[in-house]
Image (cartoon, grey):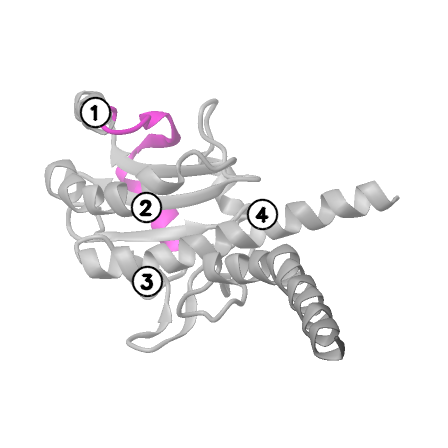
Amino acid sequence: MKTAFFNFANNLIMKKYIVLVVLFVLPLVAYLFFSSGINSFGKLPILNEDLSVLKEFETDDITFDDKITILTFFGKDFSIKKVHAFNMKEKIYDRYHKFDNFQVVTITELNSEENIETFKTEINKTSDASEWLFLELEDEKIQELFKSLDSDLKLDEKLSSSYAFIIDKSMNLRGRSDDEDEGTKYAYDLSNLKEVSDKMNDDVKIILAEYRFALKKNNAQREVN
């Protein structure tokens, strides 16, 4: 009888542990998995603070404040750069464009309307293009905007770049301060599919998880108060 009783008690204890694991441990593991990556569960480093200069380039349709922005530069090289951008479309945009306040902003030369509409049509074949925005600027303004990012990269002779930058809701440039290949990593090479699917995808997940966690924390505090 004693043996049967102890076995019964042990079974009850084990069931309680299983319930605790399901209720508390698994959600924590899921969160850590979502926010995991090269940067080991931490916040994505700020490389350039307060890019308030971006507000000078805002329009009725495009704002940077309170937006997680992927910033790219097609410049005068729309045809080649859009091929690179489709790496990001498949690995980043299609996965995350439905998140609140997420957007892609691409800088192009003036009078790019026809190319822009063609690009949006291609995006719309697999996903909603409404969060991929285009900003047409004069040559000097393109150079000014790119220079304001204060990175170690340069625009090419066509005022374009294969790199994408992550700008957070407070208009800070985010990236990696201790990348294993580059040291400080200001942006992500869209022509390199592996880099987009690995490093860039990891870092976008981290910054989205960061804001989702902050939102949940704020909501919990409001409920307590």
Mark 4 residue element: helix
| Image side of residue 187 versus residue 22, left or right | left
Q: Residue at x 16, y 37 (%)?
A: 78
**Disc 3 target residue:** 199
Image x and y of residue 124, in percent = 25, 24
Whichever of callouts 2 and 1 sits on the residue coming sooner in the sequence is 2
Q: Which mark is residue 4?
A: none
The amino acid type of the residue labelled 2 equals: Ile
Q: Quadrant of residue 11?
A: bottom right
**Disc 2 target residue:** 92
Q: Which mark is residue 212?
A: 4
**Disc 1 target residue:** 125
| Image side of residue 225 versus residue 209, left or right | right
Image x and y of residue 2, in percent = 76, 78
Mark 1 residue element: loop
Whichever of callouts 3 and 2 sits on the residue coming sooner in the sequence is 2
The amino acid type of the residue labelled 1 equals: Lys
Mark 2 residue element: helix
Image x and y of residue 48, in percent = 49, 61
Q: CA distance from mark 3 to mark 4?
A: 20 Å
Magenta stretch: includes residue 105: no
The amino acid type of the residue labelled 3 equals: Lys
Labelled pair 3, 1 in contact (Cβ < 8 Å): no
Q: CA distance from mark 1 to mark 4?
A: 29 Å
